[in-house]
Amino acid sequence: MPDTSPDLFGAPDLPTLAREVEGCTRCPLHAPATQVVFGEGPAAARVMIVGEQPGDREDIAGRPFVGPAGQLFDEVAQAAGLDRGDCYVTNAVKHFKFVQKGKRRIHQKPATSEVNACNWWLGQELRAVDPALVVAMGATALHALTGKGAGLLKRRGGVERTKDGRPVLVTVHPSYLLRLPDPEARARETEAFRRDLARIPDLL
Ligand code: URA
């Protein structure tokens, strides 16, 4: 969708964006979702953390990363010496995409068209917060930020650039860790995730 929104006054402030995003119809995901889940955190955060999209719990709470993936992120961030309260935390896509199976709502990966439609909001958040470092957690965030999501595991640990030239630390999504069936592999990968997050102060 072409960007036809007026942009006469420079970077908008986060409360204005949070109000405007509530009426977003840029892609079809707004219809079945309970509500939009915008980013949260200090407007002057130096670190912006970007995930994929809200999950079931986030869709109900209206806040990013409050479900199982968020709890794991909080634990690992704390172990890495990163205070989530100092970070601006958001997602590439602001509505939960799911299929209903009985009473359960099963997460669906967002389509490229949905990521692209929501990219306008992510761009506005980047301009409003103006972080020194962006952290891409997973392939969807990496795609939204850099324009290319393929090859995540080869790129993880690297520092790339957003489409508007900001440094992006590439790492895995906490849901990837939760899905690993082998406890040893999960422990190893969780430690690698901790090491990625522990590099943040050196990259600022
Ligand atoms: N997964 C995400 O990518 N974001 C959330 O907010 C929750 C789970």
Image (cartoon, rainbow, N blue to C red):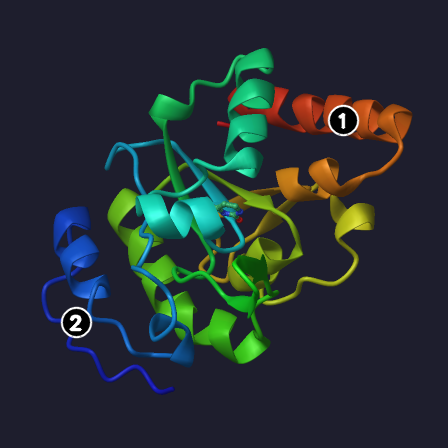
- Look at the numbered disc 2 and give the secondary structure of its residue: loop
Given the image, on which type of amino acid does mark 2 rest?
Asp
Q: Quadrant of residue 86?
A: top left
Given the image, on which type of amino acid does mark 1 rest?
Ala
Question: Residue 171, position in %: x, y?
Answer: 67, 40
Does the closest atom of ligand 1 sit within 8 Å of the Cβ of label 1?
A: no
Q: Is residue 98 above or below residue 6?
A: above
Mark-to-mark CA distance, 2 and 1: 41 Å
Question: Residue 38, position in %: x, y?
Answer: 31, 52
Q: Is residue 176 above or below residue 186?
A: below
Question: Residue 136, position in %: x, y?
Answer: 57, 46
Label 2 environment density (alpha carbons within 10 Å; few <14, some 14–19, many ≥20): few
Question: Residue 167, position in %: x, y?
Answer: 53, 44
Nearer the camera: disc 2 or disc 1: 1
Residue under label 2, please give it.
Answer: 7
The foreground one among 137 and 62 is 62
Q: Quadrant of residue 84?
A: top left
Q: At x 60% / y 62%, what residue is drawn? A: 143
Does the closest atom of ligand 1 sit within 8 Å of the Cβ of label 2?
A: no
Q: At x 58% / y 59%, what residue is drawn? A: 107
Residue under label 1, please give it.
Answer: 192
User: Seen in the image, is 33 located left or right of residue 171?
Assistant: left
User: Seen in the image, is 140 located left or right of residue 24?
Assistant: right
Mark 2 vs 1: CB contact within 8 A: no
The foreground one among 189 and 104 is 104
Q: At x 50% / y 66%, what residue is drawn? A: 97
